[in-house]
Image (cartoon, rainbow, N blue to C red):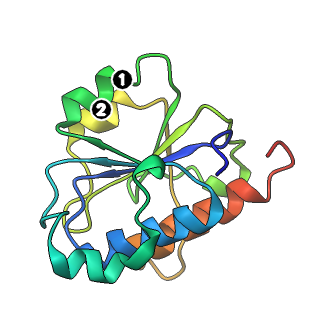
């Protein structure tokens, strides 16, 4: 397990299948995952556990019971928000080991207050003014960028 890479944080995820896919991706690639509750589903549900299969590793996932608890734990951390409400592309951004990259809820993104708490807001450029990518796909794209940087 590699934890000298940026962490991925999911802000109150709505869709269990996306979260399960992200858990699997992070588990396979040695990326720490942080889940900011409440979620739009029950994490201990048997259906969710079946989708996650054996990729659920408690050592690789941190849960935060509220956004306040999450942000309190990140006082000395550079926070990067992936959002469609930015014009700055992730492509030229240099991620650092101690970064936490936050992805918003599928149905809503993140509240305005979260935008104000982050150090950087980045987007994944899309053609033809498409609204957004699937959350799991977005996380995979950013993890790929992180893993392809020379500093990791």
Q: Where is residue 92 in the image (x, y as percent from the top left)?
A: 73, 51
Q: Toward which corner of the image does residue 111 lie, by quadrant?
A: top left
Residue 103, image x, y percentages? 39, 54
Q: Which mark is residue 99?
A: none
- Which residue is tagged 2? 70
| Figure disc tally | 2
Camera-side residue: 35 or 129? 35
The one of 148 and 121 positioned closer to us in this rendering: 148
Identify the residue shown where x is 39% and y is 70%: 135
Q: Which label sits on residue 73?
A: 1
* Furthest-right residue in this view: 150
Residue count near mark 2 (Cα–Cα under 10 Å), binned few <14, some 14–19, many ≥20: some
Q: Is residue 54 left or right of residue 95?
A: left
- At numbered mark 1, what does the secondary structure look like: helix, strand or loop? loop
Q: Decide: few, some or many residues near mark 1? Use Cα within 10 Å; few <14, some 14-19, many ≥20.
A: few
Q: Do the residues labelled 2 and 1 touch (CB within 8 Å)?
A: yes
- Give the image quarter of residue 124: bottom right
CA separation in Å, label 2 and label 1: 5 Å
42 left or right, relative to 1: left
Against 113, residue 149 (above or below) is below
- What residue is drawn where x is 74% and y is 57%? 147
Viewer-nearest residue: 23 or 53: 53
| Disc 2 secondary structure class | helix
Q: Quadrant of residue 70?
A: top left
Q: In this view, does 25 lie to the left or right of 39?
A: right
């Amino acid at each position: 397990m590699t934890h000298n890479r940026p962490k991925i944080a999911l802000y109150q995820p709505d869709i269990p299948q996306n979260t399960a896919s992200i858990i699997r991706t992070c588990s396979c690639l040695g990326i720490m995952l942080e889940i900011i509750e409440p979620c739009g589903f029950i994490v201990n549900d048997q259906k969710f556990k079946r989708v996650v299969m054996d990729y659920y590793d408690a050592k690789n996932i941190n849960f935060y019971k509220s956004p306040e608890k999450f942000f309190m734990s990140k006082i000395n951390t550079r926070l990067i928000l992936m959002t469609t409400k930015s014009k700055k592309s992730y492509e030229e951004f240099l991620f650092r080991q101690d970064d936490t990259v936050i992805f918003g809820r599928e149905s809503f993104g993140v509240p305005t207050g979260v935008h104000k708490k982050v150090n950087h807001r980045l987007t994944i450029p899309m053609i033809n003014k498409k609204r957004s990518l699937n959350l799991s796909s977005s996380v995979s794209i950013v993890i790929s960028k992180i893993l392809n940087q020379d500093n990791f």
